[in-house]
Amino acid sequence: MTTKRIVVGAHYGLKDWLAQRITALVLAAYTLILLVTLLATPTLDYGSWAAIFGSGWMKVCTVLALISLSWHAWIGVRDIYMDYIKPTGVRLLLQVLTILALVGYACWAVIILWRV
């Protein structure tokens, strides 16, 4: 006896599970780097923050963390939309708005970072 299975979703599965774990590790590493850097800084004023984020290596680490955060958030929110928003048009609209917001936030953060 064979049973028909209704398969839903886009079969992201392992790829997205792995991407969320990797982006979480990148964010954890960035948090530790930032924490150690802040604890090693004697005073936390604007000059200290500008010095921390003015260095090239910290800018690269921060951009990697921003990309990881955006990707991590996208996977989570997309999965929520796919699970709970059934009308296709509404789900597509929410996904497009979420992508635009995440890209906009990431670009805005990079602009701020590169002004330092």
Image (tube, helix red, strand yellow):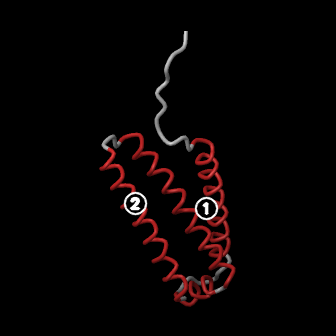
Residue 28 is drawn in which quadrant? bottom right
Give the image location of residue 38, x and y in percent: 62, 75
For residue 36, above or below residue 21: below
Q: Amino acid at mark 2?
A: Thr
What's the residue at 56%, 82% (across, down)?
44
Q: Secondary structure at mark 2?
A: helix
Tell me the quarter of the image containing the C terminus: bottom right
Residue 49 is drawn in which quadrant? bottom right
What's the residue at 53%, 86% (across, down)?
45
Q: Secondary structure at mark 1?
A: helix
* Residue 98 disc label: 2
What residue is pinned by disc 1?
Answer: 27
What's the residue at 46%, 69% (across, down)?
103
Relative placement, left or right, of 82 versus 42 is left
For residue 22, above or below residue 44: above
Q: Foreground: 2 or 52?
A: 2
Give the image location of residue 112, x and y in percent: 49, 83
Marks 1,2: beta carbons within 8 A: no
Task: Categorize mark 2 by other alpha carbons within 10 Å: few (<14), some (14-19), many (20+).
Answer: some
Q: Amino acid at mark 1?
A: Leu
Q: Foreground: 80 or 56?
A: 80
Give the image location of residue 7, x and y in percent: 49, 31
Relative placement, left or right, of 29 versus 66 is right
What's the residue at 61%, 61% (across, down)?
27
Tell me the quarter of the image containing the N terminus: top right
